Image: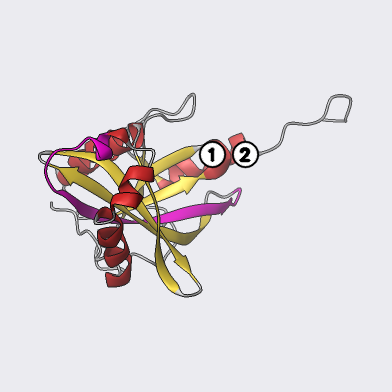
Amino acid sequence: MPLHVPPAPAPALRTVLMALGSPTAVHEARTPSLKNASGPATPELPLPVHVLDRIAPEGTGTARLTGWRFLIRCGDRAVAAAETRLTPDGWAFSHFFEGPYITSTERALRQAEVMQQPYQPRLLSVPELYMLTLWLHADPTADGADGHPAPNDLLVPLAPAPPGIAAHRPHRVADLLPVLTTRLTPAPLLGSPA
């Protein structure tokens, strides 16, 4: 089934296109692949980026939208990504970047394309674990800016994943969030009663 990529806000896309057209923005970016790319660079596959603020012990989470990420394609491959963020004045370009999450995101999206159920792709960040996942939302018609991980949604950890969590292996939210909860629970202090 095809993925149903939500449309990015037009102002977010405009800020990325303006940054790509700005020699200063591209030159100052820490993205050698983007600076050295030959041919036109185009933003593709806009994905809403949500941050998981809290994971409840029962395995539910609270997420909030923090921006939109666009893969920047030159020729036949993504060479970088552009991130936008919401400000009080609207959508603003944040930065370009490159690294392992670019190819890992592409790989996870290709895996999701062949699944039987239609999904809406999003990114879900778990900052406390330095973890980024492809969040496959089970309602492909939902507003990409809203919502929280539902128990039957899938999370696909992107590489590099935290130790003990396999990258590119889909997990139901109801199965993965309780595991993450145990990792986020602070260890008892030495000498304190258990």
Q: Which residue is mark 1?
A: 180
Q: Which mark is residue 145?
A: none
Pointers 2 and 1 in contact (C-beta within 8 Å): yes
For badge 2, the amino acid type reads Leu
For badge 1, the amino acid type reads Leu
Identified at 59% across, 34% down, the residue is: 183
Identified at 30% across, 38% down, the residue is: 102
Instruction: Determine the secondary structure under disc 1.
Output: helix
- Distance CA(mark 2)–CA(mark 1): 6 Å
Q: Which residue is mark 2?
A: 184
Name above or below for residue 21 compared with residue 156.
Answer: below
Total numbered labels placed on residues in the image: 2
Q: Position of residue 189 (x, y in %)?
A: 82, 30
Query: On the rendered structure, is 79 left or right of 165?
Result: left
Q: Which quadrant of the view contains residue 17?
A: bottom left
Which region of the structure is painted magenta?
33-57
Q: Magenta part mainly helix, strand or loop? A: strand
Identified at 28% across, 55% down, the residue is: 22
Query: On the rendered structure, is 95 left or right of 140?
Result: right
